[in-house]
Image (cartoon, helix red, strand yellow):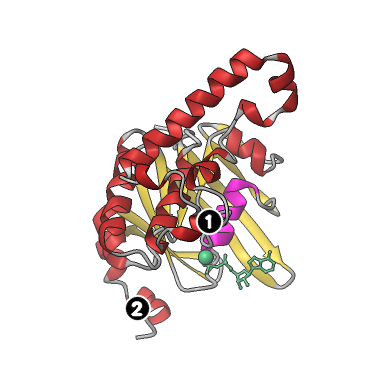
Amino acid sequence: MSALISLKDVCKSFGGIVVADHISIDIQRGEILGLIGPNGAGKTSLFNLISGVYPADSGSISVSGQSLDGLNLHQRARLGVARTWQHMRLFASMSVLDNMLVAPRDYPGEKISNILFRPKQTAAANVAMHERAMGILKRMNLQAIADSSVNDITFGQQKLVGLARALMNDGECLLLDEPMAGVEGNAYETMKSIVREEAASGRAVCVVEHNVSFIKDLCNTAVFMASGKILERGSVDSLLASQTLADLYFGA
Ligand SMILES: Nc1ncnc2c1ncn2[C@@H]1O[C@H](COP(=O)(O)OP(=O)(O)O)[C@@H](O)[C@H]1O
Ligand SMILES: [Mg+2]
């Protein structure tokens, strides 16, 4: 079975800093792969390379068998690369709903030509986007805050809205950068069940997380990175039992 997300020998450096050193990773549909490692390991950089924030120096990345090489962030989003950001990047003074409508792939209402020349189709598509957004918020039990300003909701709710915005892209590749950082209580449980559901629906999910119990609960396999290299990969339990990981990650 061919992997949904496939990285082959991906390398990237910034000056003397190697953030990706011959990285090869395959993620299957329905899989939730954990990506763990100390700060500065290159985890976020790997997501930036997959989503097209910057190009790789060498190697190749494909999604659903289609090469992403040479494509920018927006083109990759259109091909189904959905991601969240470690620092949420929400528009704080805008409503939750408007944040979700900012960037779904192929949002027809963002093009003036559509509004002028295809008003009916555009209006219908906008209604569909609105309904999709409300459906996602309902799954998170956040429908009541759809019109609230992001400024006025809790941090946990903001993290969920970051995920909700990513889910507006219904593509099959979902990259989650520290979704649980600072999240507790109801929001924690909601985050966990939504991520599980998204994988069950056929997405290939990769999650960067320091919260070990979250990784244990959701992932069968994980990859351990440090200094831009994959040092170990395997079952979450085997990784957590590894001495290399203990030394580098927990400073034991
Ligand atoms: N655009 C960039 N320019 C220069 N250095 C960068 C850039 N992005 C990341 N780095 C460096 O690459 C290393 C890995 O960063 P990052 O991928 O954010 O790590 P992680 O997410 O694992 O904490 C860090 O040393 C960081 O300072
Ligand atoms: Mg990071």
Whether ligand 2 has any atom under 8 Å from the Cβ at mark 1 is answered as: no
* Residue 172 covered by magenta stretch: no
Decide: is 25 above or below 124.
below
- Disc 1 residue type? Trp
Residue at 41%, 35% in the rendered image: 134
> Which residue matches tag 2?
246
Specify the principal SS of the magenta part.
helix
> How crowded is the residue under tag 1: few (<14 C-alpha within 10 Å), some, or many (20+)?
some
C-alpha span from label 1 to label 2: 27 Å
Expressed as whole percent of the image width and height from the top left, the position of residue 179 reads: 41, 58
Say whether residue 188 is left or right of residue 148. Answer: left
Q: Earlier in the sequence, mark 1 or mark 2?
A: 1
* Residue 49 covered by magenta stretch: yes
Quarter residue 245 falls in? bottom left
Residue at 64%, 49% in the rendered image: 59
- Which mark identifies residue 168? none
- Disc 2 residue type? Ala
Q: Which residue is more in the foreground, 39 or 246?
A: 39
Residue 220 visible in image? no
Expressed as whole percent of the image width and height from the top left, the position of residue 233 reads: 38, 59
Decide: is 219 above or below 103.
below
Say whether residue 34 is left or right of residue 100. Answer: left
Q: Secondary structure at mark 2?
A: helix
> How crowded is the residue under tag 2: few (<14 C-alpha within 10 Å), some, or many (20+)?
few
Q: How many marks?
A: 2
Point out the stretch of residues depicted in magenta. 43-52
> Which residue matches tag 1?
85
Residue at 59%, 40% in the rendered image: 103
Quarter residue 213 falls in? bottom left
Residue 168 visible in image? yes
Expressed as whole percent of the image width and height from the top left, the position of residue 128 reads: 48, 24
